[in-house]
Image (cartoon, rainbow, N blue to C red):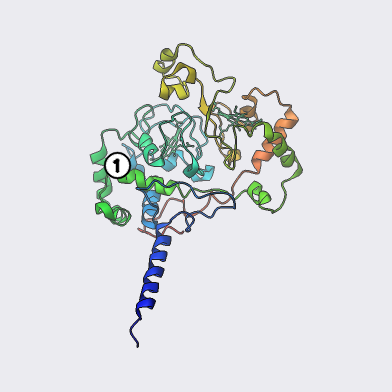
Amino acid sequence: MKPMGKRALALAVLMLAASGALAQGRPGAGWWQLPAGIAPPPVPPGNAMSAAKVALGRRLFHDADLSINGTLSCATCHDQRRAFSDGVRAHPGAHGEPGLRNVPSLVNVAWFTPLTWGDPAQTTLERQALVPITGDDPIEMGMKGQEAELARRLSGNPCYRKLFRKAFPETRGRIDLASVSRALAAFERTLVSYDTPWDRARAGGDPLPEAARRGEAAFAQCAGCHAGPNFTDLRFHRLPGGAADADLDSVIDSGRDAGLARATRRAEDAGMIRTPSLRNAAITAPYLHDGSAPTLEAAIARHGLALSPARTAELVAFMGELTDRTITTDPRHARPGARCDIASGY
Ligand code: HEC
Ligand code: HEC
């Protein structure tokens, strides 16, 4: 056989490089199948997507070893069947400490900043993942000061040793909190949901039922805050019930939730809450930051907008068309089996 000419060799190298870029998951290169008009989410420069990292993040997400007493994984509170929320008002922490806030869905969090109901400092998924693991206000997974213990547990598992090595070749697979949070963030960036009747209707598919279409028209008065394809402006607002409390310190000291002011300690931020996304809202009850609204009707009523029951029903019908029936069962997000698989299914 004739040896490969210089040109052919250069071409082969180029093609290899291109397929490498695909495997790395550069934006648009396979990690995200997005409808027209939705740009790929931002990925921090130090944490490129890769199959190994996503597979690792998925395993960590479903692993109760991330909590001090093995009682809680991320998925305990962020349950795939409920679009990664949990169906209770506020989930207790690992030792049974009362939770402070309702568990939000994680669908499309790759596009959200800031994260959470009320902390402007939570600008990346990498950083946010440390809050449930090591935070103590409230205690969730209870691993504050237990980084060595966490590394010890994970290192004892040959599958983790292999996945960390493949996911983080630059540190030769060092197992620490930083790499745990980076892998979790990469996995969370794959929790993408734009496959709903509303998305399909927008793309020219079947139109929504009549009541939902009336609800969509009425939604114009909601879209100032529940804006854009994820139905959130990612800004902080105070609903009528969200009391602005003059005596901020006593609210915070009493453990009650002062909303944004809990993070900023500014009196004018008391009761301010980041607008939640409404995607999959029909399956993420209960509602509001404190889980105090058991139904969508109750959540809408708390906005103080004086809507008729008929109008409210139309709005609820519209929100019913924002449910993605595949994200809740997508095997790529489910708890992984015992087999130590690197292929992430993308
Ligand atoms: C005990 C229940 C619980 C566990 C366990 C838990 N979370 Fe959460 N999560 C919450 C609650 C409650 C919030 C809202 C917190 C707030 O707003 O202050 C939240 C918020 C989030 C958000 C922000 C979502 C948004 O819309 O802004 C992300 C991302 C997240 N969690 C990821 C994780 C990851 C990753 C893990 C595992 C390391 C995890 N969570 C473990 C309860 C939990
Ligand atoms: C001024 C901004 C604003 C407008 C306008 C607005 N919302 Fe909201 N909405 C919010 C905020 C902020 C929250 C969270 C409040 C809280 O948790 O206490 C919220 C919460 C919700 C929730 C609960 C979601 C969840 O996951 O907990 C629903 C449902 C909802 N809004 C629907 C609507 C509808 C329908 C309209 C129009 C009739 C509307 N909103 C208008 C800001 C707004």
The relative height of residue 227 versus residue 160 in the rendered view (above or below) is above
Residue 7 percent coordinates (x, y): 38, 77
Foreground residue among 17 and 34: 17
The image quadrant where one finds ligand 1 is top left
Visible in this render: residue 49? yes
209 vs 335, left or right, is right
The relative height of residue 177 versus residue 161 in the rendered view (above or below) is above
Q: Is mark 1 within 8 Å of ligand 1?
A: no
Residue 334 percent coordinates (x, y): 46, 51
Residue 224 percent coordinates (x, y): 62, 32
The residue identified by callout 1 is 177
Q: Residue at x 65, y 30 (%)?
A: 297
Visible in this render: residue 62? no
Foreground residue among 170 and 80: 170
The relative height of residue 247 versus residue 341 in the rendered view (above or below) is above
Q: Quadrant of the N terminus?
A: bottom left
37 vs 118, left or right, is right
Helix, strand or loop status at disc 1: helix
Looking at the rendered structure, the kind of residue marked 1 is: Leu
Q: Residue most toward the front?
A: 7
Q: Quadrant of residue 227?
A: top right
> What is the total number of numbered labels drawn onto the structure image?
1
Foreground residue among 173 and 145: 173
Q: Residue most toward the bottom?
A: 1
Q: Residues within 10 Å of mark 1 (few under 14, many from 20)?
A: some
Q: Residue most toward the top?
A: 247
Q: Residue at x 42, y 47 (%)?
A: 43
Q: Residue at x 41, y 39 (%)?
A: 124
